Image (tube, rainbow, N blue to C red):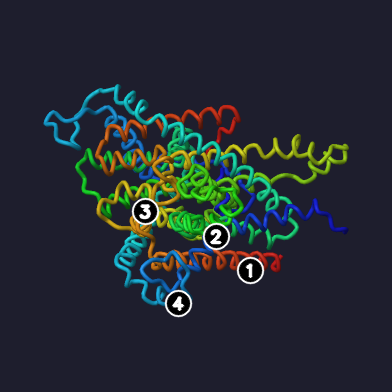
Amino acid sequence: MRFSLGRAALPIYAVLAFVYLLIPIAYTFVFSFNDTFKSNIVWRGFSFKNWLGVCNEQGVCEAFGNSILIGVVSTIIATALGTAIAIALVRYDFKFRSSVSLLLFLPMATPEIVLGAGLASQFFNMGAEKGLVTVIIAHVMFCLSFVVVTVKARVSSLDPALEEAGSDLYATPSKVFWKITFPLLMPGILAAALLSFALSFDDFIITNFNAGPLSTFPKFVYTAASKGIPAAANVVGSAVFLVAILIVVAVQVSSTIKERRLKAGK
Amino acid sequence: MAFAAFSSGSKTDYKAPRKQSVIVAMSLLLPGMVYLALFFITPLMSLVVTSLEVPDASGEIGRYQYGFEIANYWTVIETYWPHIIRSFTYALVATILSLLISYPLAYFIGIRARKWPLIQKLALALVIAPFFISFLLRTFAWKQLFSNESWIVTTLQEWHILAPDQYLVGTDFMVIFGLTYNFIPFMTLPLYTSLERLDLRLLEAGSDLYATPAKVFRKVTLPITMPGIISGTLMTFIPIAGDYINASRDFLGSSDTQMIGNVVESNFLRINDYPAASALSVLLMAAILALVVFYVRRSGTEDLL
C-alpha cells in the first residue's frame, strides 16, 4: 500500500491528542521527584526524598487515609444498593419502571455543585454536624447511579438458561443466586466498585460542601493550591495513578487469558 | 448510555422474560430508592426552601428563617448575571472545542483501530488515564506549565503573540483551556461507543455509490453517531457549567473569570449567605434540566440509562 498523507493524518492526530492528554500526568509524576526547597515550582534536580518522606509533609497522609476510608465504606454501601437495583431493573417486572429510571438518571445529570449545596443545606437545616458520616452519605448518593448502570450491563448479558439449568436440577432460588448468578455477575460488580471508588476518591466539589473540618486528599490539594502544592501531593497522586494503571492492566490481561481459554476449549 | 463505556460487558444482551414476584422486586429496589429519596430528592427540596428564606429576626449574621421571598431570585439574577452568562458561555465554548478535539480521536479508536484490537485497548486506556490522577493536580499542572515565568509564556512574548506585560493564567482563554482538557474523556467515551458499533458496510455502500468521503461522513457517519454526540455534549456541558475549580483564583482563573460555582461556593461556605447560594443552585439546576429535556425530546433518546 502506498503511503498517503490522508491516511496517516488520523493516527498522527491521535498520537498528538494522547500527548496532550498525558502532559499534566507526566508533569505531576516528574515533579514528584523534584529536589524541592520550600516550593515545588522550579526543577532543582532529581531526588527520592519526597517519595521516602511523603508523610513528613503535614496533613498529607492523614488526608490520604481519610480518602481511602471514605472510598472503601461508600463503595461497599453503593455497590450493594446499586447491584440490587440493577438486578431488579433487568429481571423483575414492576410498576413505575420509568420513574425509577428517571430517579437514577437525575443524580448523574445534576451538576456536582447543586448536589453538594443541596445536601449541605439539608444537613444545616437538620442541625447535623459535618464530618466523616456526612461525606460518606454524600458519596454513596452520587456513586449509586454509576453502579446501577455498570452492573445493569452485566446482568443484561447474562444467559438466563444457566439459571434455569440450576433450578431444573432442584437448586433452591437462593442457591441458584449464590452459586450461579452472583459469581457470573462478579466482574460487573468489581468494575462498578472500582469506578465507584475512583469517583469517591477524586471527588472534591461535593466533599468540600459536606466535610466541615474533615480533610480529604482533594481537599488538602485545594487548600494547599493558594500557596503552592507540596511535592508530597504529587507523590500521592502519582502513586495512586500507578496502582490504578496496574489494576486496569491486570483486569485486561486476565480477561484476555480467559477469552483465549474459552476459544481454545471450543 | 455514556457510562456503559466504563464497563467491559459483553455485547450480547439476553431478553429473558421478567419475573413477576413483587415482593422480591420491591425488596431489591426499596433500599436504594429510599436512599435517593432521602439524600437526593430531599436535599433538592431543602435547597428550594432555603432559597426563599429571609434573614432571621434577631439580625444575627448567617441565621435565616422560613419565608417566601421570591425576590431572592431577582436579587441573585441582578447581582450575578455576569457570572451566569459567563458560566454558560464557557460551557458552550469548551463543549464545542472538546467535541472538535474528541471526534477525530474517537473515530480513530472506534473505526480505524478496529484492525488492531491491542492498539484499540491501549488507546482507550490512554483516554481514561487522566481519571486516575487527581483532577486538582492535573489542573494545577497546567497552571504551572502556563505560569508567568514558564517558557511557553516567555516564548509567546518573544514572538510578540503576547505583549510583554500579558500573561495567560487568569484569562478566559486559560479557564476554557482547562475546562476543555478536563472533560475531553467524557466526550470521547460516548463518541467511541457509538462509532465502535457503526457497521463499516454502510460506509462502503456510500462510497460504492460514488459519494465523496466528505459526503459519506455527512450523510452516514454523522447521523448514525448522533446519539453519541448528544450524550457526549450533555456529559461535558453539565459538569462544566457547574465547575468552579478551573475558574478559581488558586487554579487557572482570576477575579474576572468567576463562574456560578465560585459564587455558590463563596456564598455558602465563606459569607454564609445560604439563600443566595441556594437560589443560584436552583437556577442552575432548572437551566440544566430544561436543556436535558429539550435535548432528549429533540433527539428522541428516551432510554436514559
Q: Earlier in the sequence, mark 3 or mark 4?
A: 4
Instruction: Tell me the crowding category of disc 4: few under 14, some 14 to 19, or many 20 or more residues within 10 angstroms, Cα based.
Output: some
Give the CA separation, mark 3 to mark 1. 31 Å
Q: Are marks 3 and 2 on the same chain?
A: no
Circle number at residue A77: 3
Task: Select label 2 or label 1 by which is in front.
Answer: 2
Query: Which residue is at a point 32% across and 69% down the rendered structure image?
Result: A57
Element on which disc 2 rests = helix
Give the CA separation, mark 2 to mark 1. 47 Å
**Amino acid type, mark 4:** Ser
Label 1 marks a residue whose chain is: A
**Amino acid type, mark 1:** Ile
Element on which disc 4 rests = loop
Q: Quadrant of the N terminus of chain B?
A: top right
Q: Are marks 4 and 1 on the same chain?
A: yes
Label 3 marks a residue whose chain is: A
Write down the residue under mark 2: B151
Write down the residue under mark 4: A47
Circle number at residue A257: 1
